[in-house]
Image (spheres, rainbow, N blue to C red):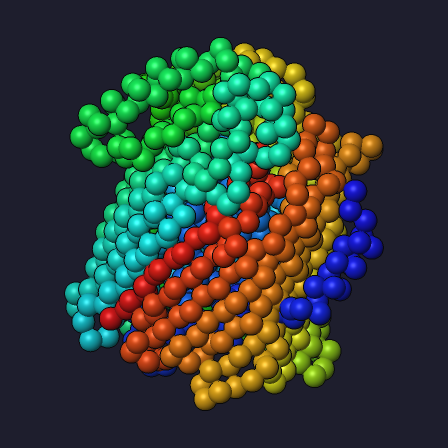
Amino acid sequence: MMKFSSVLASGTAWAALVLAVPAVAADDGAAGGGEQDASHRQPSTEIIVTAPYDRNRDTVVQAVTVLQGDALQLQQRSTIGETLARQPGVSASFFGPNASRPILRGLDAERVRVLTDGIGSFDVSNTSVDHAVAINPLLADRIEIVRGPAALLYGSGAIGGVVNMRDLRIPRDVPEGGPHVDAVSGYASAAKERNVGASVNVPLGGGFVAHGDGSFFRSSDYRSGGFVFSKPFREEAAEQGGEVAEDAAARGRVANTAARTWDVAGGLGWIGADGASFGFAVSHLRNRYGIPNGLDLAHHDEHEEEHDEDHAEALAAAAEDDHGDGHGDEHGHEEGHGHEDITLSMRQTRVDMRGSVPLGGAFKELKVRGGWANYRHDELESNGAIGTSFFNRSWEARAELVQAQRGGWQGATGVQMFSRNFRAVGEEAYIPENETRQFGVFTLQELDLGYARLEASGRFEHSTVRSDAIGARRTFNAVSVSAGASVPLGDGWRLALSLARAERAPSAEELFANGAHAATRAFEIGNPNFRKERQLGLEGVLRGRGKGWRVEASAFVNRFDNFIALDPTGTEQDELPVFRYVQADASFYGFELSGAVTLAEVGQTRIEATAMADYTRAKMLGGGGAVPRIPPLRLLGGIEASGGAVGGRVEVEHVAAQRRVAALETTTPGWTMINASISWKPFGVDAPTTLLLQANNIFDVEARRHTSFLKDVAPLPGRDIRISARIAF
């Protein structure tokens, strides 16, 4: 068990080497800098747009991280989870490289809302860890992470925080001087990954702007550092001997992890001279990806012959796939290690709209935002047959009435509606057909007294979750409130404190799940009698900034009543391990520390030492032990050069071993990675074009993420050389 004293000692030792968070999350200004037209101008990273109105990052009471421009390009991956996994307080579920969802302070799934410009992703990624988020980070213009309870503005599903990705699909400005193009492209060696994406905004006159974008991504099975399977798995397989022992000793590529994704979108916006605006966008996404194969030690022998036959049929089916989705030899070209290949084929059609109307008197603006999506994914077996299909039709709408700022007082009040119709069809439809309806009313109010800035917010949400298939219906009324204040301490320091009481209604999955799920290789059981989850949280954020330095430290304590967790029972049903949703009280506490100090300035180039540390500890109260899949202590730091035409970074990332585990959960060894990058702005520091070369996990270490259900069978990628370009003109 990791004692807090050992955490502190380890952190002190590392602090001698590294001093503050990666500058990717703390840039002083907009990426690219210089004179740019409106279509390429981004808000400063000190301005937070995940709110009804822009807010100053220094005065908000929650811990916030912003990624955009060069910083975003450095971290950009094919999933939103892996794109953000190295930010303070953030980990990821990593169900392989193609299905990875953000985890904030140890909270995931139903407690973290992943948004596109303030509206949900309309997928089923909250249903299971093998389901990818239907958001494409390759087209992101800006990503904001709000850690801590954001349920008051965005729904009870944000009780742990919000990840908001902003794209350019609905134009916000009229481009100056004609059409404007943003494009990205890249290659990565670990998975032979190729990607390209581009968007264009074209002024049509009269304030109208047309938008179009598209992207394509393709990868092969990725290569890990060291062994594919963990040491405990290898030892158990060695006792059995024979072919299972040979399979368990595999190194290198992780079978059945190839992917192919493309999307396309078009939109139209109108921007009025008086500040009014309206726009809409239509998009379509296709994503086909494999789930990493496991090693079924208990049933290896009896399934091996069947797997070999299925593998041959899969190759034949892939060769006949005239759409190219079978990836040819990229899917399943290695042995399956005792498991059949499972592939997910996802598609989503989505419509979005956004509008604003300037007002007078006590109110500044009325803002509206809405979206609708039709989603489906099929879980394909080795022979290409559809095992189970998941369907989801959702819509969400919100309206916000923004108050005019008067005497230091500003705020906004709004309503939000959400509807979700879900059904699964097939052999392993482990969740019955269900629908969810939510209606919420919320308000955010701020008062600047000069010597302090006060903030208060509240939300009432009415939810109905029903499944006519099993004759079940639950209704919940959730009330959430928060209050906080930030005060200047002098000499560039500011302290913020906040207290929040938030409630969350159980999801349909937590209530109604009851069956086998092949992709996760688990039998999941919910409980239709669950009560509301309640959270009481206290958070403090200390920010400091001066000439040549900056620092931000946050600490949090959260107490949950009726916390819902998915725990293994140690039993089997249908030859699958049984996982049951349970409800008990729990507590979470931890910290995040980040900052930077300037070592030297050479012309326009600033050389900084940067570092970050974060830690979360969580336990089930009443003798329940540790909460499963909680990330351990992490330390990251390095030396970075930025501000000039040529920049670069060398860093060390250390993740401690996680030995404080839940019942039936295995420990995870620690690891240390060395990463490096070099960037070049060929058209000058003021131009938004950047070429980037990265070398990640340079020493090819074997690393496993404790938050992953597949940590014993799917390590993180090994040495990965990445080349990318971001172009705007």
| Total count of labels | 0
Q: Which residue is drawn at 60% across and 32% down?
A: 506
Q: Quadrant of the C terminus?
A: bottom left
Q: Residue at x 51, y 60 (%)?
A: 675
Q: Which residue ends up furthest to the bottom in the rendered image? A: 603
Q: Quadrant of the N terminus?
A: top right
Residue 351 in the image: state x and y as whole percent. Answer: 31, 45
Q: Is residue 706 left or right of residue 371?
A: right
Q: In this view, does 201 lie to the left or right of 631?
A: left
Q: Relative to 445, is 120 above or below?
A: above
Q: Is residue 378 left or right of residue 705?
A: left
- Front one among 394 and 42: 42
Residue 96 in the image: state x and y as whole percent. Answer: 47, 38
Q: Residue at x 29, y 72 (%)?
A: 273
Q: Can residue 107 be seen in this view?
A: yes
- Front one among 671 and 383: 671
Q: Which residue is drawn at 59% across and 82% down?
A: 599
Q: In this view, does 257 lie to the left or right of 313?
A: right
Q: Relative to 522, is 121 above or below?
A: below
Residue 360 in the image: state x and y as whole percent. Answer: 43, 69
Q: In which quarter of the image is residue 208?
A: bottom left
Residue 79 in the image: state x and y as whole percent. Answer: 43, 47
Q: Is residue 272 visible?
A: no
